[in-house]
Image (cartoon, rainbow, N blue to C red):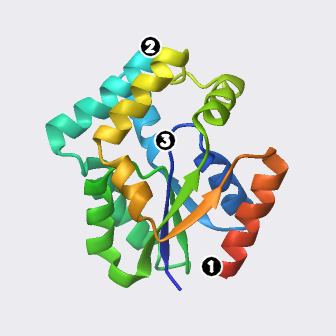
Amino acid sequence: MVRVVAISGMPGAGKGVFGQVAIEMGFIVRSMGDMIRAEVEARDLDENPHVFGRIAQELRDKYGYGVLATRLVGAINKDLETTEIVVIEGMRGDAERNIFAEAWGDDFGVLAIDSSIDARFQRILARGRAEDGDRATFEERDERECGWGLGLILKQANWRLSNEGEIKEFKDASKAWLFSHCE
């Protein structure tokens, strides 16, 4: 059994929904996307799709592609003092994966959430987050995140979970996955 599970997927695949299910089940969830949202807020920047992407890329350019993972390792180690499992929601790059694998070795694994581009775009339209935008922005974001190594992570994940149906179906599948891999 792993102690740290990183959830990866393209934008709109269902990482946040999976994370919410994990929280409801009592797991500690650390969101990498929340780290970017907090950075945008701390800088008092206008919340629009281009700002979130720019800040995410700026942090990686300035501090390295593993910056968010490096910042998160200490907090997760502290979490592991009081809990058996921690879920990382939104790992997007191979540099991040490498940092996590170095920190926890065999106690670390990656779950890829698979979803079609059309299903993902419809979810993004429905959720209405500030970092989401139109179809062109969505496709730019896909390209940017693949440039961070997300495609490689998805190919090399330890486990896969499909999210093509209704949200209740995916929540049930997420809960079943957590029960079978983390309980």
Instruction: Assess whether mark 2 and mark 3 are in contact (beta carbons under 8 angstroms).
Output: no
As helix, strand or loop, the secondary structure at mark 2 comes to loop
* Image vertical order of residue 94 relative to residue 131, above or below: below
Residue at x 67%, y 62% (from the top left corner): 22
**Residue annotated with mark 3:** 34
Image quadrant where residue 162 sits: bottom right
Instruction: Assess whether mark 1 and mark 2 are in contact (beta carbons under 8 angstroms).
Output: no
Residue 133 coordinates in the image, percent (x, y): 54, 17
Residue at x 26%, y 73% (from the top left corner): 102
As helix, strand or loop, the secondary structure at mark 1 comes to helix
Residue 44 coordinates in the image, percent (x, y): 40, 19
Q: Nearer the viewer, residue 49 or 170?
A: 170
Give me the disc on residue 46. 2
Amino acid at pointer 3: Asp
Can you tell which of label 2 and label 1 is closer to the viewer? 1
Label located before the other in sequence (2 or 1): 2
Amino acid at pointer 1: His
Give me the disc on residue 181. 1
Q: Is residue 91 left or right of residue 166?
A: left
Amino acid at pointer 2: Asp
Residue 78 coordinates in the image, percent (x, y): 42, 71
Residue 58 coordinates in the image, percent (x, y): 24, 30
Q: Is residue 179 left or right of residue 129?
A: right
Label located before the other in sequence (3 or 2): 3
**Residue 44 visible, this angle:** no
* Image vertical order of residue 119 relative to residue 79, above or below: above
Q: CA distance from mark 2 to mark 1?
A: 40 Å
